[in-house]
Image: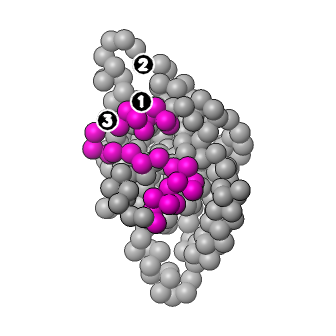
Amino acid sequence: MINRLLLFLNRLLLGSLIRIEIIGKDKVPASGAYIATGNHIGLIDALVVYYVLDRQDIIMMIAGKHRKHAFIRMLVKSVGAIFVDRYQADFVALREVMKRLKKGGVLIMAPEGTRSPTGSLQPGHSGAAYLAAKTGVPVVPVSIVGTEDGHMLANLKRFQRAPVTVRAGDLYTLLPLPKEDREGTIQAYTTEIMCQIAALLPVEYRGVYADHPRVEELLN
């Protein structure tokens, strides 16, 4: 009931703030577990992805630093989100995420870990790659353009809704981690995840992955 209400309120809020174009919605599964990975450029990114996926079993991971705020703690509890320590391996949080994925939930992750200060892709962290390989659930790459905080604020000052484009790519899966060179494999998987996102973005948003040969391969 709470999740249904929050989905409704989220739609009302975003409807007043943005004009959203969704490309590739047919590539997003309507049911079953998967990990949605995307770039992170603005405060409302999670709300936008929440809107696009339109599921009540979404798993969100919130930086542990926000735990000190009573309102955020209440909101996190209401939506079933999980606090996670971004600065060390938080195995308690990871085990909870894997448990929910096995039950068919959907995990939203921004592999960069935090909002990009430039709006373009920063190097990805390994959490999404580890979870995808460990659970075997498919990954859906997602890109967001237009939610930058400055862009949103400028449109609000003009009493205009900001144009936002969300694009979903093809599902893919990562093989289980091998016994040998697990760290190297996780790094390679992380690069793959980031390149999949970069290929969905305009060139000026691709950041450190702009000239990566895997991006060129995905685009051709």
Residue ID at (48%, 40%): 196
Residue 26 lies, in percent from the top left, at 71, 46
Which of the two discs, 3 and 2, labels the residue nearer the N terminus?
A: 3
Q: Nearer the viewer, residue 199 or 114?
A: 114
Question: CA gap, disc 3 to disc 1?
Answer: 11 Å
Task: Determine contact: label 3, label 2, CB under 8 Å.
Answer: no
Q: Which residues are magenta?
A: 71-97
Q: Hey, which quadrant is residue 36 in on the image? A: top right
Above or below: residue 57 compared with residue 76: above
Mark 3 or 1: in front is 3
Q: Which residue is mark 3?
A: 89
Q: Is residue 129 visible?
A: no
Query: Is residue 80 within the magenta segment?
Result: yes
- Identify the element where label 2 is drawn: loop
- Identify the element where label 3 is drawn: loop
Badge number at residue 130: 1
Q: Is residue 77 visible?
A: yes
Mark 3 or 2: in front is 3
Question: CA gap, disc 2 to disc 1?
Answer: 8 Å
Q: Which residue is mark 2?
A: 177
Q: Quadrant of the N terminus?
A: bottom right
Task: Determine contact: label 2, label 1, CB under 8 Å.
Answer: yes
Q: Residues within 10 Å of mark 3 (few under 14, many from 20)?
A: few
Name the residue type under label 2.
Answer: Leu
Q: Residues within 10 Å of mark 1 (few under 14, many from 20)?
A: many
Which of the two discs, 2 and 1, labels the residue nearer the N terminus?
A: 1
Above or below: residue 120 compared with residue 125: below
Residue ID at (60%, 70%): 14
- Identify the element where label 1 is drawn: helix
Residue ID at (63%, 32%): 103
